[in-house]
Image (tube, rainbow, N blue to C red):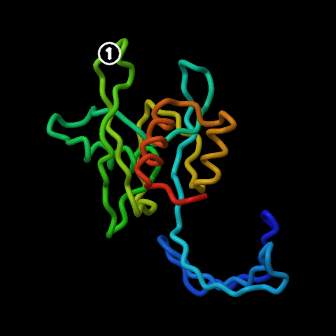
Amino acid sequence: MQNNWETVSSDRHFANAHVEAVTEHVRTPARSEPRTWTTAHRKAAVIIIHQERIPIRIAIWEMPSGQIDGPADETVEQVALRELREEAGYELAEDGELIPLGHYFTSPGFTDERGNFFLARPVQKCKEASAGDEGESILDCREFSVVEIRRMIAENEIRDANTLSIWARLWSRGLLPPG
């Protein structure tokens, strides 16, 4: 029960990687008899990796990211998709899109390095396993709900600037579902 809202029953009619349709019988704070709603929910999972970071001597949860270290003609879009495959084992779904979200300066008091943000959606697990990068120590990769990510940020479980920055960019552009 959440804020005096009680789900009496729930029946899922349809679900795929992107959406689910559910009929719920819900008792609200204003009504003692359950009301029936059929709703469609867009599934919103955020994929983050748990990676050891030697300079800070801990493993942290962070968004997949990487550097342009491939062929000289590799675009930032290609790098983003490669890193998604290598670090997380995911790729764009057939109907997926890679949405550019702009760039940021990593540490403007020290360097002119800039990073690029992208939103890849929808994604799916890679059909073939990725070799990964020998120089990385990725311990885990999981899907988290928006609510879980917000909690992790609030409780200081997510602490790296890249992940916090992209989260702010997604939120400010209205690209995160309520939760």
Q: Residue at x 48, y 48 (%)?
A: 171
Q: Residue at x 78, y 85 (%)?
A: 34
Residue 20 appears at what percent x and percent y? 55, 77
Q: Residue at x 53, y 43 (%)?
A: 49
Residue 80 appears at what percent x and percent y? 32, 45
Q: Is residue 5 left or right of residue 98?
A: right
Q: Secondary structure at mark 1?
A: loop
Badge 1: residue crowd in 10 Å (few <14, some 14–19, many ≥20): few
Question: Furthest-left residue in view?
Answer: 73
Q: For the C terminus, which image quadrant?
A: bottom right
Question: Furthest-front residue in view?
Answer: 30
Q: Quadrant of residue 83?
A: top left
Mark 1: which amino acid? Thr
Residue 143 appears at what percent x and percent y? 57, 55
Q: For the N terminus, which image quadrant?
A: bottom right
Write down the residue under mark 1.
111
Q: Is residue 84 left or right of residue 146?
A: left
Which of 117/83 is in front?
117
